[in-house]
Structure formats: structure tokens, C-alpha cells
Image (spheres, rainbow, N blue to C red):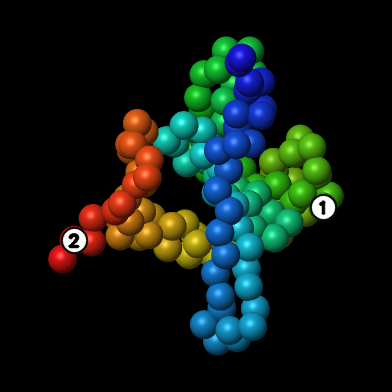
């Protein structure tokens, strides 16, 4: 059985959370958007920042020169990546950038499990 592409994309979204250092009771929830092994974007609060997309009909990957920002409250269909209202909120790239940096560092500390690895998996301790 072959799953629809949208469903496959949905299955590849990673979720994480970060506790604020200054205020440990606050939790920021975010989602990393992957297609295969490629990071396509990040969703944080009501914002989504995309670096790449898959072209409809061709499945060709496009990489943007400048990330696309979507306010999911005012543009839930992600139709308008750059508006005057969106441009006034480019500050979101800094917290999202910090999350992306931490995500990259976490992948260095604990690399993803390779496809085909037998289950149960026991990570090496690196002692």
C-alpha cells in the first residue's frame, strides 16, 4: 500500500520542546519539518519558516534564497509567504534560529538511527 505524499510528509514531522532557562515553567513547543533526510522548515508558536518545498506535480525540491514565513493564524493555508504584516514579524527568525542551532547540535551529540538498524536498538555509550 502506498501512502499519499501529504500523509508521508506528516509522518516525518518531528516535535520537540525546550524549557526556557530563565523561566523553567515555560515550555516552547516546536516542530521540525523533514522530507526524507532534508530539513525543510520549522514551526514555532503560530509561525512557520520554510527553507525548501516540494513542487506540486513534479516532486522537485526547491530551495529558497530567503526563508518563507507564514503566520498560521492569519494565513492557515500558507498562501502568502511575504506580506507587509509578515515582514513586521521577522523577529521570529531569531528564536527559531536558536531552536535550529540546538537541533543541529543535538544531532551531532546523538546521531539519528540509520535506516535498517535491527530492533531492539542499543546506542553505543561512547565511553
Q: Position of residue 81 (x, y in %)?
A: 69, 41
In the displayed orientation, state which residue is furthest to the right.
74
**Residue on which the image places disc 1:** 73
Q: Position of residue 96 (x, y in %)?
A: 55, 60
Residue 79 or 104: which is nearer the viewer? 104
Determine whether 93 is above or below 70 in the image: below
Tag count: 2
**Label 2 – label 1 distance at C-alpha:** 45 Å
Residue 1 or 63: which is nearer the viewer? 1
Secondary structure state at the residue bearing disc 1: loop
Q: Mark 2 or mark 1: name the one nearer the start of the chain.
A: 1
Determine whether 55 is above or below 53 in the image: above
**Residue 38 is drawn in which quadrant?**
top left
Q: Residue at x 33, y 37 (%)?
A: 118
Q: Position of residue 12 (x, y in %)?
A: 55, 38
In the displayed orientation, state which residue is furthest to the bottom.
22
Q: Residue at x 81, y 44 (%)?
A: 75
Q: Position of residue 39 (x, y in %)?
A: 47, 41
Q: Residue at x 60, y 36 (%)?
A: 11
Determine whether 5 is above or below 102 in the image: above
CB contact under 8 Å: marks 2 and 1:
no
Residues packed near mark 2 inside 10 Å, few (<14), some (14 to 19) or many (20 plus): few
Q: Which mark is residue 126?
A: 2
Q: Is residue 65 left or right of residue 55?
A: left
In the displayed orientation, state which residue is furthest to the left.
127
Residues packed near mark 1 inside 10 Å, few (<14), some (14 to 19) or many (20 plus): few
Q: Is residue 30 left or right of residue 83?
A: left
Give the quarter of the figure containing the C terminus.
bottom left
Determine whether 30 is above or below 40 in the image: below
Of the two numbered discs 2 and 1 in the rendering, the one whose residue sits closer to the viewer: 2
Q: Which mark is residue 17?
A: none
Residue 16 or 74: which is nearer the viewer? 16
Amino acid at each position: 500500500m502506498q501512502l499519499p505524499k501529504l500523509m508521508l510528509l506528516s509522518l516525518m514531522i518531528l516535535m520537540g520542546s525546550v524549557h526556557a532557562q530563565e523561566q523553567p515553567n515555560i515550555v516552547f513547543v516546536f516542530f521540525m519539518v523533514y522530507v526524507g533526510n532534508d530539513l525543510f522548515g520549522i514551526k514555532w508558536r503560530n509561525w512557520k519558516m520554510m527553507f525548501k518545498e516540494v513542487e506540486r506535480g513534479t516532486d522537485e525540491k526547491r530551495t529558497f534564497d530567503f526563508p518563507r514565513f507564514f503566520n498560521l493564524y492569519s494565513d492557515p493555508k500558507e498562501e502568502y509567504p511575504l506580506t507587509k504584516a509578515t515582514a513586521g514579524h521577522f523577529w521570529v527568525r531569531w528564536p527559531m534560529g536558536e531552536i535550529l542551532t540546538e537541533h543541529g547540535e543535538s544531532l551531532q551529540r546523538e546521531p539519528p538511527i540509520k535506516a535498517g538498524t535491527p530492533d531492539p536498538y542499543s546506542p553505543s555509550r561512547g565511553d
